Image (cartoon, grey):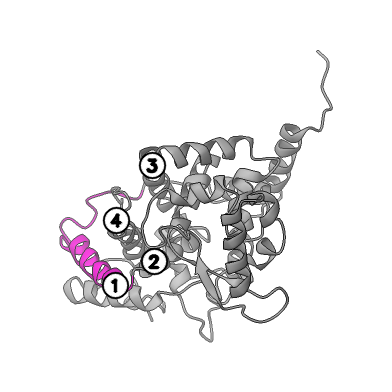
Amino acid sequence: MELSLSFGPFSLLFMILVFSIGNTSIIHASSDSYLTLDYYASTCPTVFEIIRKETECAVLSDPRSAALIVRLHFHDCFVQGCDGSVLLDDTVTLKGEKTASPNIHSLKGFDLIDGIKNMVESECPGVVSCADILTIAARDAVILVGGPYWDVPVGRKDSITANYALADTNIPTANEGLIPIISKFMYQGLSVKDMVALAGAHTIGMARCENFRDRIYGDFRATSGLNPISASYLSSLRSICPPIHGGENNITAMDNVTPNIFDNSFYHTLLKGEGLLSSDQEMYSSMFSIQTRELVKLYATDPLAFFNQFSESMVKMGNITNSESFANGEVRKNCRFINT
């Protein structure tokens, strides 16, 4: 049988993925063997109700809180698994992840998790991990802005370490291409379908000028065409974010249609070529987007398919575990610091 040496898009995609994954130094396995739905049934039976009430207060006070909590959960799980390491502050003896480049300007809402933790501790001291609180709160936050429900397996332990270097390398960034982002998801045991569905969380939340400047002064006009409405939207974005310096902290919604509602309109923006972040638009417009483009189309036309897959993918991501945290982890008294 003759071997083909073709270097078309499919072959190149495969080679890049193999290279990317093969050169990753640490592999996280996704496992839910430690997690159960009834882990706190006898030790803290009211934990889900407490977290729901506190999350509801936060989201009702500011709907943007939902996106902050979901983003914290995502950035936690992509580094050492879902073990609450993202919540740790820097100390003399520990370098946290909060100042890593993907986190330093994008992560907020730590005070929201602190507040929930305090309420849980007052009811069940020393029982419920910060990692579980963050995972449950992310689910509740999505529901509170119109998104789907899913069961949350619990029983995670809080790590006693953080990993600044992995935070710098593992978390997808706004200007990354499709292939590197796919490889980062595959590294976590997540599929392309998981990636496209989880990106749908961008239907809520904001982005900083620093993260969409290259997009709006780059290929935005090419992907959105000559549509006058798109041109007006682009003009508005450029008024928020100047081309060179300044305005780095100016923000705008990633879904400019229903920014505070969890729905599938994010995918409609990609179909129009108006994705705010380059990494998002790549899923529809990249030359490598054969599979991702079809998923974007599916979720744009079938909101139930999106909700079902998002729920499934959130469980899968939430089940990314680090065996070390189960062997050496703890239940922190304060989410910002390891116990002394």
Quick one: SS at disc 2? helix
Q: CA distance from mark 2 to mark 4?
A: 12 Å
Magenta stretch bounds: 34-62
**Residue at figure coordinates x 71%, y 55% from the top left:** 219
* Residue 28, x across and y down, in percent: 54, 51
Q: Is residue 322 above or below residue 102?
A: above
Given the image, on which type of amino acid does mark 4 rest? Ile
Crowdedness near tag 3: few (<14), some (14–19) or many (≥20) residues, C-alpha within 10 Å = some
State the residue in front, 289 or 47: 289
Give the left or right position of residue 131, taking residue 19 as reference: left
Q: Quadrant of residue 146?
A: bottom left
User: What residue type is disc 1 on?
Assistant: Ala
Determine the residue positioned at 47% across, 36% down. Answer: 298
Residue 119 seen: yes
Q: Earlier in the sequence, mark 2 or mark 1?
A: 1
- The answer to the question of whether label 3 and label 2 lie on touching residues, with beta carbons closer than 8 A, is no
Q: In the image, what residue occupies the spot 31% across and 49% down?
A: 148
Work out whether residue 173 can be spotted: no
- Tag 2 and tag 4, C-beta contact below 8 Å: no
**From mark 2 to mark 1, how far is it between C-alphas?**
10 Å
Amino acid at pointer 3: Pro
Q: What residue sits right under mark 1 in the picture?
A: 58
| Image location (x, y in percent) of residue 5 | 84, 27
Query: Local crowd at mark 1 within 10 Å, few (<14), some, or many (≥20)?
Result: many
